[in-house]
Amino acid sequence: MFEHLVKEYALKKAPSTVIPVGVSIEEVKRKYGLEQVYKLASNENPYGVSPKALAAMMDALREGHLYPDSTRDNVLRKKLAEKHRVGIDQIMVTCGAANALAYAAETFIKPGEECIIPSPAYPPYYYNVFKNDGVIVDIPSRPDDMMLDFDKILEAVNEKTRLIFICNPNNPTGTAYPGHTIFEYIKGIRKDIIIVVDEAYIDFTDDSEKDTMINYLADFPNLIVTRTFSKIYGLAAIRLGYAVACPEIIKYMNKSVAARSLSNIGIEGAIAALDDEEFRQMTVHNNKVERAYLSDEFTKLGFKVFESQANFIYVDFKSNCQDLYFKLLPYGVMIRGDFSNARISIGTHLQNEILVRAIKDLNDKGQL
Ligand SMILES: Cc1ncc(COP(=O)(O)O)c(C=O)c1O
């Protein structure tokens, strides 16, 4: 009915996103008579919310009748600036990293300009380019190891290129490069090309302090790094992320914000989360142990597991992933089945064991 009225971007569809919608945990429980269903599909923190953040957010709720005190944003920005050893004017706090990515695209992509997206990719990159009438230049990752193909990315750069999305570690493959390798690859790129490095999963790499491209901001005025509190601090529902860039870029990106969208609850949660070193370290440690456990189990069964530095793994089960998604539901496990391989979030040990048992059972029955 409104097809002829909507803007062109609203009619476009990102490649490889056919997520089986509409299946909720409650539905799966009812349908299969299960007491527990484990969602290993959205790369959430399986250990819950950072306890320090939770306590701060409970307190903040008492002020829920008041509009947020925007001066608290600056407290968070100052804390982030200290953590990353940058100026406070280099930090923009956003409603999830998702919004930081959207603001970067909105600020820089003009109609017809090319944006390089290495694939498979986090689907919102595509929509951000569509929405701003940019042109997507798709660069497939290397098929053997699913590493981003930087040689091809560099070859694709031309005079129309305006922006490059780099996700490190990459979603959905989990593969990652050390920061200095990315530096070597991007150092020759023209400074009028905006390089967005999405570090939603950087906390899970072997050496996140070294790997972050925030260390290289002084060399790249054209670099925007995005981060999130959703994964490492278990604040996915709270919607808190940020961008780090040079002051001029942050100034322009701030123009994208029509009205203040951050809640006092999120801000207080994030301020407290940054002090929750115990929870952060526990999450990183357990993720590493469990990632190795799942990778070993699936490798032993003869399936290819791509080398992951994230809180999920990408596995070639040699079967249709959407079918696999539905076959796992009766076992009480939900994975992500809309990419060409299965993307599995690392759960607690109990959750991971249930998944391994389910995969073994399907494999034994010849149903994979
Ligand atoms: C690669 C990547 N970037 C950004 C985001 C968005 O994070 P946020 O929850 O902060 O919006 C996600 C969320 O899953 C993600 O996977």
Image: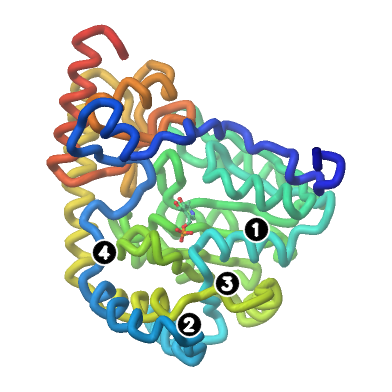
Find out whether the residues at labels 4 and 1 contact each other: C-beta distance under 8 Å: no
Secondary structure at numbered mark 4: loop
Residue at mark 1 = 188
Label 2 environment density (alpha carbons within 10 Å; few <14, some 14–19, many ≥20) = many
What is the image's colouring?
Answer: rainbow
Give the mark nearest the N terminus, 2 or 1: 2
The Cα–Cα distance between marks 3 and 2, rounded to whole angstroms, is 13 Å
The Cα–Cα distance between marks 2 and 1, rounded to whole angstroms, is 23 Å
In the rendered structure, which amino acid carries the disc numbered 1? Gly
Front tag of 2 and 1: 2
Q: Can residue 53 be seen in this view?
A: yes
Q: Which mark is residue 49?
A: 4
Give the mark nearest the N terminus, 3 or 2: 2
Q: Which mark is residue 337?
A: none
Residue at mark 2 = 86
Label 3 environment density (alpha carbons within 10 Å; few <14, some 14–19, many ≥20) = few
Residue at mark 3 = 219
Give the mark nearest the N terminus, 3 or 4: 4
Quadrant location, the C terminus = top left
